[in-house]
Amino acid sequence: MGSKEKQTELEEGAAAVAQKIEVVNGNDAVARAIVHVGYDGEGYYPITPSSDVGHEVDRLFAEGETDVRIVRATSELAAISVAAGMSLAGGRVVDVTSANGLLLKAEEMPVISGLGLPVVMNLATRDVSAPLNIKNGHSDLAAALGYGWMILLAPNVQAAYDMNIIAPRLAEAVNLPVLVAYDGFHTSHGTRKIRVFENRDDVRKFVGEPPERPTFLDVDDPRTFGPYMNDDLINTKVVIEKKMERAADLLPQFFAEFAELTGRQYSEVLSYGDDQATAGMIALNTAGETTRVAVDDLAQENIQTRLIEPLVLRPFPGKQLLEVVSGLDTLVCAERVSQYGAGNYLANELGALLQQHGINSTILERTYGIGGLRFDVDDAKNLLKLAVDYPDLSEDQKKRKDYYGAWPGDVDAELEEKMQPLSAEDTIFTLDADDDKARSRVNTRQLTEMPSRIGPHSACPGCGIFANLDTFLRGIEGHVAVLFNTGCGMVVTTAFPETSFKIPYFHNLFHNASSTATGITEIYQRFREQNKIDEEITFIVVSGDGGNDIGMDQVIGCALRNDPFILLEYDNKGYMNTGNQVCYTGYEGQYNTNANVGPEQIGKPHAHKDIVEILRGTYAPYLFQAADVEQRDMIAKARKAQDVVRSGGFAFGKLFSVCPLNWGLASHKGPEAVSKAIQSCVFPLYEIENGKTVLNKNPEKRDSKIPVSEFLASMGKAFAHLNLEDNPELVDKIQGDVDYRWERLKALADHDLL
């Protein structure tokens, strides 16, 4: 039996600097590294499972542990563009993302590498949709292979910390960005005991001062960045290639210096097991960690195998892979991704490498673990045995490309129909459509007898989303089809294979449902004109949880085009489905997980965004604000909105929606908070019909107007610090902002034209 090369364990290796033990998960480890490196700036947008990195960095900022400048952007693309600007100005910059967030950043990723900006990006890997999935997969990582970024892999929590210290040094040594990939949930949320530097100055000494490079702020020697380029573009690709080659030369030195400091030795490719084995497997990140155990278990059965575990994907470690693959007759290439071509990504690259050097090893490609599908030691042993037993396998088992862990399902299963579709007759008001007064009235049937379009769901107790939607839908007659942006309202209603909807439903990503609705209504109108469809259908887009931050450009486009559908925003004051991060509609001073409260920061640092007033400038025919505690008002507005759509126009409604979980509010206290939002004029009830403002409720006329402080006191723990005793200046500032907006709104309502 040959020798074994084991990965350095936590206890092994002498360290030249003081370290301490901490028990943290992968996201916290990354945050520690960000703070220890001493970055100048971080672009940030939340996406599961990477969001907690920003939460922890912001918490440390609020406590005065770091002075990194955090920009809470309105989208993933905005966040990476912020990071590009920070780096262009000469700052040391970091960003964090996952899955579709990386895809949204895609157009800026090659910009950053093409400009030679040494940005560091953390990727908590996750499968991209559809269907929506938040668990581990490497389809996002695979998409990044061609961006011109260097890519380091972190197979465990310790490596997530360490690679984030090596990454900025590597990036700045060659002026190329670095992506550090660690497995979503398996590593990002996996708690482990790790060693971190006791003195952050030791980290900064290893990373070094940022080297001199051209920046946008150099007015004495001004440069043009990102010029227009034709034929010379190919030469920029050559430059990136040369930088990759230079990085490949430097990495062994950086790994060796890091090992001398910490006792933890990394290399481009790790090999584990019997170096005389003729069968093995290549696996990335946590699958490699699992496979180590499988290699040991098989060795106890006198079955010798070898694990190949790359820690670097770019620059491609061809030389190191050749060294460790040499002697393997059969190699299973296991990947958490599927490419629909000659082979999967890593297998194709490995196959090309072997072919170039005349090596005829058999590569068996197996896609596994998609969407976080469990991959345990027995699974790893099964794949290793596939390589060991290859000569004796059947032709079907010898498939070069296949899926491991997939199942056909029960094709003979008889599924029970759980919901009956609603007919148009079930939802008709039986009122004269030409009688404006009749259509504006709200009768008892609409409040109590209109059938619900949404069935049982799993929302938190006291959630305001469905109280609002159910009330609003009682004012809509006939067939309805809904489109949801990603958010709590979507997540708690469509967990496969169940659904809460008795009506047609579609989910598109965080910000895209409004544009999707535009496409649907265009074809709907075309088919109506061609007499292919007889039914009248009212289309309603539902957004919230920050969907109209990242998607505001698309909303404005729909309003400007006057697309015939209703867009509702349940305004719960945060990105609640990803953990209560800052949403621009949230109130100033509000606690969010990425806007912490501490000596250096008091919650969200700016006033709330007034989407209705922004959309006023589009001259959309109908805009309104409503709340479920005022049912008759909301249903009347629903009827007006449907009339606008029937006449070919766009309608937008903002609904005040409580979130007891993230506000820290008792579930039965929601209606009280909503009422006080209206009474304090923080959330006034009004509508804009064809440019004319109408106040639906004026607390001043009933002598029921209350100060903002009374409203904030009703909002729960996320607002508890906003009181006149603890933060009088901030509360006064918020009151002044509310007063200004209220007086302006009254002036608009009093004006004949506005």
Image (cartoon, rainbow, N blue to C red):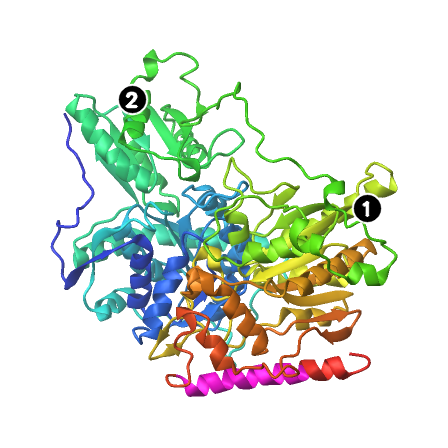
Is residue 332 positioned above or below 696 on the image?
A: above
Please state the horizontal and vertical placement of residue 567, each as a whole percent of the image. 67, 57
Residue 194 in the image, given as x and y percentages of width and height: 21, 54
Residue 737 location in percent, x, y?
Answer: 56, 83
Residue 251 relative to residue 371: left or right: left
- Decide if residue 95 is on the left or right side of residue 74: left
Q: Which residue is mark 2?
A: 385
Q: Give the magenta range.
A: 727-744
Q: Is residue 730 magenta?
A: yes
Q: Nearer the viewer, residue 652 or 281?
A: 652
Label located before the other in sequence (2 or 1): 2
Residue 281 falls within the magenta-colored stretch: no
Determine which quarter of the picture holds residue 569.
bottom right
Residue 525: numbered disc: 1
Label 1 neighbour load within 10 Å: few <14, some 14-19, many 20+ = some
**Which secondary structure lies at badge 2?**
helix
The quadrant of the rendering that contains the N terminus is top left
Q: Quadrant of residue 423?
A: top right
Q: Quadrant of the C terminus?
A: bottom right
Percent coordinates x, y for residue 54 in the rendering: 39, 63
In the picture, measured across the screen, residue 9 lies left or right of residue 716, that is left
Foreground residue among 648 and 474: 474
Q: Residue at x 42, y 41 (%)?
A: 137
Farthest residue toward the front?
444
Hey, what amino acid is under mark 2? Lys
